[in-house]
Amino acid sequence: MILKKRYITVLFCYLFFFSTCSHSAQEYPEWFLYPRKFNQIIVGYSYNGLSAREDAAHMFCAYRDCIVKGYLEFFETPRADAILKNSNYHYWFAQDSVAAVQEHLHMLEKFVFNVITGDYTAAFYLDSCEINFSPPLPRDEIPRPAWIEHSYFRGSGFHYGVGMYTAKGRENDGWKTAEEQAIFSILTNISVNIHKTSLSEKNPTYPANQTFEEILFMSVYFHLKDIEIVERFPDVTNHLYYVLVRIPESGIHSPIINKAVPAEKFEKK
């Protein structure tokens, strides 16, 4: 029995060591880092109980045509660098089309983030096509892009948003969250209903020992089409994951202003 326990312990340590080593030395596929080069590919993650195939079908439908509605909250404190964020928003899209899309997804390739947790991402396609992959890039050889220095910018008829998130344990969670933040970086730079409310320092609704000067509410209500992931960048040293998203100007409409968002409402940030 003791030998069995020792064997299990040694096996677990080996798997942990192997996963850690393979994770740190892993090579990212080109289709994952530069999806803009592979328009036919749909990327999916194993995420929140969904398989990568299910996630790919959901995101394919949502990014083609969806409604985003909800609000963001910014709690401003006396310290200029201390802003707490809360959010409550949802995506609406054609759920009945997800099953139909999923049936026609074919996996091309996948790679595992962590062998112990089983987290992975995969590349799928809907129709028969020829795709030539270049050799994967080692993590320490991925060039640092200039776009990570911005949160939002415009160009050539598109709005670009940059999202960033850190995740030391679950890398796919980091990528998914960064992707979502990139989309909201675009939306919050376009058009929002904004109002402020002063808060009492002794308001029991909020955390103890925290003084708030005011709360900023930003409501979002958009009809989005043709959301596209352009590029991804992993900052391996700091465990930061960056995603660049773009949406065409013609693909952004807001019921709040009841028309396509005019270009003059934007400024580079």
Image: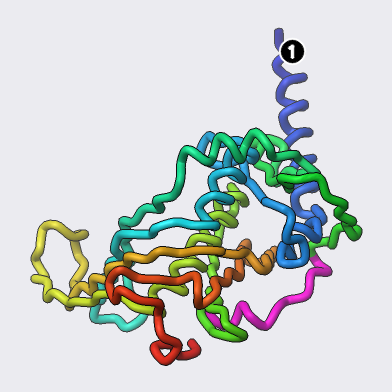
State the image quarter where residue 53 is shown.
Answer: top right
Front-most of residues 133 and 26: 133
| Magenta region includes residue 141 | yes
Q: Which of the image's four quarters has the N terminus?
A: top right
Front-most of residues 100 and 212: 100
**Residue at 35 percent of width and 70 percent of height:** 254
Check disc 1 and give the amino acid type.
Answer: Lys
Relative to 60, is 142 on the left or the right? right
Residue 62 screen position, x and y as percent: 50, 52
Q: Which residue is mark 1?
A: 4
Front-most of residues 59 and 109: 59
Residue 17 screen position, x and y as percent: 76, 40
Position of 82 relative to 127 (above/below): below
Position of 155 relative to 82 (above/below): below
Number of numbered callouts drawn: 1
Residue 74 screen position, x and y as percent: 29, 71
Relative to 230, is 76 on the left or the right? left
Position of 115 relative to 244 (above/below): above
**Residue at 33 percent of width and 59 percent of height:** 69
**Residue at 61 percent of width and 70 percent of height:** 244
Residue extending farthest top: 1
Classify mark 1: helix, strand or loop: helix
State the image quarter where residue 135 is shown.
Answer: bottom right
**Residue at 74 percent of width and 55 percent of height:** 40
| Magenta region includes residue 125 | no
**Range of residues picked out in magenta:** 140-151
Few, some or many residues within 10 Å of mark 1 (<14, 14–19, 20+): few
